[in-house]
Amino acid sequence: MIRRLCIIGVGLIGGSLARALRQAGYVQEIVGSSRRVEHLQEAVELGVIDRFDIDAARAVQGADMIVVCVPLGAMEQTFRSIAPTLAPDAVVTDAGSAKARVVAAARAALGARLSCFVPGHPIAGTEKSGVAASFAELYRNRKVILTPLAETDPAATARVQTMWETVGAQVQCMGVEHHDEVLAATSHLPHVLAFQMVDTLARMSDEDEIFRYAAGGFRDFTRIASSDPVMWRDICLANDRAVLLMLERYQQDLSRLAEAIRAGDGVELERVFRNAKAARDRHSER
Amino acid sequence: MIRRLCIIGVGLIGGSLARALRQAGYVQEIVGSSRRVEHLQEAVELGVIDRFDIDAARAVQGADMIVVCVPLGAMEQTFRSIAPTLAPDAVVTDAGSAKARVVAAARAALGARLSCFVPGHPIAGTEKSGVAASFAELYRNRKVILTPLAETDPAATARVQTMWETVGAQVQCMGVEHHDEVLAATSHLPHVLAFQMVDTLARMSDEDEIFRYAAGGFRDFTRIASSDPVMWRDICLANDRAVLLMLERYQQDLSRLAEAIRAGDGVELERVFRNAKAARDRHSER
């Protein structure tokens, strides 16, 4: 049971967690903090949080669970603000999509309170953002990855794990580096590819006509290109090494495929397409 | 009203058209032809076709509307088979995704009957294939592009247009080359990118783990990679010039994006992502 939950950054991710914990009866009071008062007022009106304080340092006072859901670029400043005012029994976790950068920020900014920090990443979301898009079911049957540090108090990790399980998520622990590599492959690469494809098409002279003939497959393929640009800018910058590695691998494979098209090599094309379809069908059955 | 409809290649596309025309009461008899008897028997059992003939030349006899839904690589052989037995009032159309190759096949194989041929392309489909996946609503509010030739009898074009409008589609005419360029951008490029991405990930050593952490965005992005490999092999080979042009343009843009990540250029990343999101949101509202 959480006595006082503090959500810093009350958008889709933080708002959905707040809604789900309240629905589960697992939290007594929810305090929000964000950069913009309008968003916090909206969150109160929607019943997502009970009250707010625009000042994160004050917002965390007396909270036993703090979930930091700010863009990756704002993590370090947030940690620095809250470190001095954290309650003695406070546990801090986050929802950042690239863990190495968050861990570096925490090491730099949390000081003696590092042991209460549990790096986390819920593998959930939609292309929408903002508290109005939040909903209590977002984490049901989703995975949440925790990447506890050597310094992390195991009791803190256990409390974060229980919180996520309470809202229906499956929690798994792994190393920071490994998390960033896996996510570069399954999430960061497809987002970059989709953003770039829509940008490429949007800069063509017959843009309007091109989009007019886009069918359902195109809409699904590009849905993630409607995601928040600032969030994805920060993810690319924060996980640059792993993202660049995946991009390089992908570009090489794509060049080989283009070569097969140029050469009229139907055998090679069919081999790649069959392998992709088999993998996709195999894994989407689970 | 169609007296006798002949569908050659009774899968998702041809089967859905047959279902929709029957539902609309716009057809008296539906004859199917395919390479495999099992598929035709299944189509009869599902009520999609009334009867079948494995021999396309016999299947088209007495039909006033013939819709050729075979893979692009099989178009020319099909046209060659049916040309001698077409009824005097027959109209022939097709559903191929790349028109230049189909038109070349028709010119080579239809001979004196070229004037009854109306090249067509319904912009509809799902990642599934086969007659069991067909459904009458597939074409409702979808676009169908016709690319009539200089030789095409305008009355034939009108009959094909009316057929598609009867099943709820919006018909537009354009030139063959232009069709192939637009489709390379909106359909062929995303399919190639999605197939290649799943193939790239499937060949990584930690494939199983990678797919385990794939979320909803990944599933949507890769849905089209579950499409029929042979069909897409044929599309890439048939529309090679336009597909290669789009791939080249995309690869250049992607390299520039990778360069921005490498340089830590957040301004450029945000510009690309914002442009993509704006275009995607703007066009998906329609």
Image (cartoon, coloured by chain):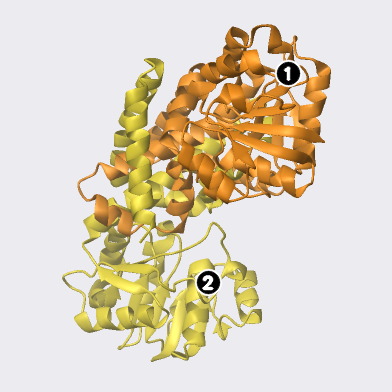
Chain colours: A yellow, B orange
Where does residue A237 sit, x and y in percent of width and height? Answer: 38, 47
Between marks 2 and 1, how big is the CA–CA gap? 55 Å
Is A195 displayed left or right of A271 in the figure? right
Q: How many marks?
A: 2
Viewer-side label of 2, 1: 1
- Of residues B226 and B279, the one nearer the viewer is B226
Disc 2 marks a residue whose amino acid type is Val
* Tag 1 subunit: B
- Give a yes or no on whether discs 2 and 1 share a subunit: no
**Vertical relation: A108 (above or below) B66:** below
Considering the numbered disc 1 on the image, is that residue within a helix, a strand or a loop?
loop
Residue B273, image x, y percentages: 53, 43
Name the foreground residue: B147 vs A230.
B147
Task: Name the quarter where the N terminus of chain A is drawn.
Answer: bottom left
Q: Quadrant of the C terminus of chain A?
A: bottom left
Q: Quadrant of residue A151?
A: bottom left
Mark number for residue A10?
A: 2
Q: Which residue is mark 1?
A: B148
**Residue B63: % across, % down:** 71, 27
Say if A219 sits above or below B33 in the image: below
Judge left or right: residue B212 versus residue B175: left
Q: Position of residue A84 (x, y in %)?
A: 35, 78
Q: Is residue B141 visible?
A: no
Q: Amino acid at mark 1?
A: Pro
The chain letter for the residue carrying disc 2 is A
- Give the residue drawn at x 23%, y 70%: A148
Point 50% across, 86% down: residue = A22
Query: Which secondary structure lies at badge 2?
Result: loop
- Of B170 and B189, which appears nearest the observer? B170
